[in-house]
Image (cartoon, helix red, strand yellow):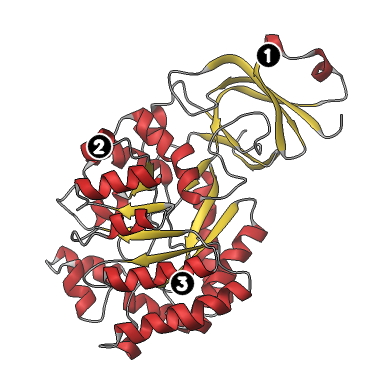
Amino acid sequence: MHNLALWHHLRLAPDANPSQVLEDACIVTQDQKIAWLGHLADLPPDYRQKTIMEHDLAGALVTPGLIDCHTHLVFGGHRAREFALRLEGASYEEIARQGGGIVSTVRATREASEEVLFASALRRLDALMAEGVTAIEIKSGYGLDLASERKMLRVARRLGQERAVTVVTTFLGAHALPPEYQGRADDYIDLVCDVMLPALVEEGLVDAVDVFCEGIAFSVAQSERVFQAAQRFALPVKMHAEQLSLLGGAALSAKYGALSADHLEHLDEAGAVAMQQAGTVAVLLPGAYYFLRETQMPPVELLRKHKVPIAISTDSNPGTSPCTSLLLMLNMACTLFRLSVDEVLAGVTQHAAKALGHPDVTGRLAVGDHADFVAWDIDSLAELAYWSGLPRCQAVVRHGQITVDHRA
């Protein structure tokens, strides 16, 4: 047995479930994967050999690595000025229609070099990783032309190469209408589907395809064209759906077997039923709800009633959720959306893994899975959703290697 490591003196929550915590547990990793886990007293004799590497986790509570399944981590500039305008009474929609919003970030992103974009995104990624994130989705969508979308996706790929984190890239060319296409939305969708997507797929930069289906973005019919284009390349899809109004985007997402439909403040019962039947995850984004001071909450009871899996994510972006703390999102999902601790923990592990759609990311700890886990300085899992601003992450292990170490 080669490259074996024993992680012991820990309490283990293999599914991040507060009611299923193993006391005095251990994990055996071999290379990048989990070879065995359970109570230390039950450790098979083969793993007790002296040549095994040992890691004493000093009584830490261990969970699967956290998964941030909806982010816009790569972008130029910031939008603090718009934040101030909103405080003075301007709405998100008013700012967008005046050339602000996404389009202002498009200008900054187009002007920024790849190196500048990488350096700024790396700071945000490091903040997320320091809190236990081991897998993340990163969208394009602030370039809105082939060269700039390519630049963003190249940066996202590079982040995954230069940091020990699993990065899934999502092409969000249909995020907003660029200034040069004002009044020609269908022509821009032609560009997204017939020029940008094929080129970016050819370069190996796209893992999934997203679209913003909304009155200030793209219609259901235009969104379906994007999904059909993704289908031609056998790429999974997802959607920014029912955030500001009910257009039927969630139902369309389900029709195409989407990994997720995200935001969902205005979701109706038909959409929830369709999502459940398709296995589409509901990704709730409390940071955007909070930051925009929305009053229409996502219909959590409807999602519960129809057993739609709920994921939680930062939506890390410059305009509506400039957040780099997934733990803060757990707290917000509990306080603002009244989700339970069990629900939010599943929302950044198993359900987030399903929304991410990466074969190496399961959001659990089981034999044969990649060894992605976090050691926390906490007594109970509820503390992950309880504390705000108090670092509780002691160490992060990804693919069997310690990647973040806050231990003294």
Residue 127 in the image: state x and y as whole percent.
Answer: 50, 51
Taking depth in this image into account, of 168 and 104 the one nearest to the observer is 168
Query: Pointer 3: what residue?
Result: 229
Residue type pointed to by label 1: Leu
The residue tagged with tag 2: helix, strand or loop? Answer: helix
Query: Pointer 1: what residue?
Result: 40
- Residue found 22% across the figure and 36% down from its top: 301
Taking depth in this image into account, of 47 and 82 the one nearest to the observer is 47
- Residue found 29% across the figure and 55% down from its top: 251
Cα separation between marks 2 and 1: 37 Å
Residue 194 in the image: state x and y as whole percent.
Answer: 48, 82
Q: Is residue 243 above or below residue 116?
A: above
**Mark closest to the chain's N terminus, 1 or 3:** 1
Mark closer to the observer (1, 3): 3
The residue tagged with tag 1: helix, strand or loop? Answer: helix
Residue type pointed to by label 2: Thr
Residue 129 seen in this snapshot:
yes
The crowding category of the residue bearing disc 1, from other C-alpha atoms within 10 Å (few below 14, some 14 to 19, many at least 20), is some
Residue 290 in the image: state x and y as whole percent.
Answer: 24, 51
Q: Is residue 312 above or below residue 251?
A: above
Cα separation between marks 1 and 3: 51 Å
**Mark closest to the chain's N terminus, 3 or 2:** 3
Residue 349 seen in this snapshot:
no
User: Is 244 displayed left or right of 190 in the figure?
Assistant: left
Mark closer to the observer (3, 2): 3
Q: Is residue 41 above or below residue 231?
A: above
Q: Quadrant of residue 70?
A: bottom left
User: Is 92 displayed left or right of 253 in the figure?
Assistant: left
Query: Pointer 2: what residue?
Result: 335
User: Is 191 displayed left or right of 338 in the figure?
Assistant: right
- Residue found 25% across the figure and 65% down from its top: 83
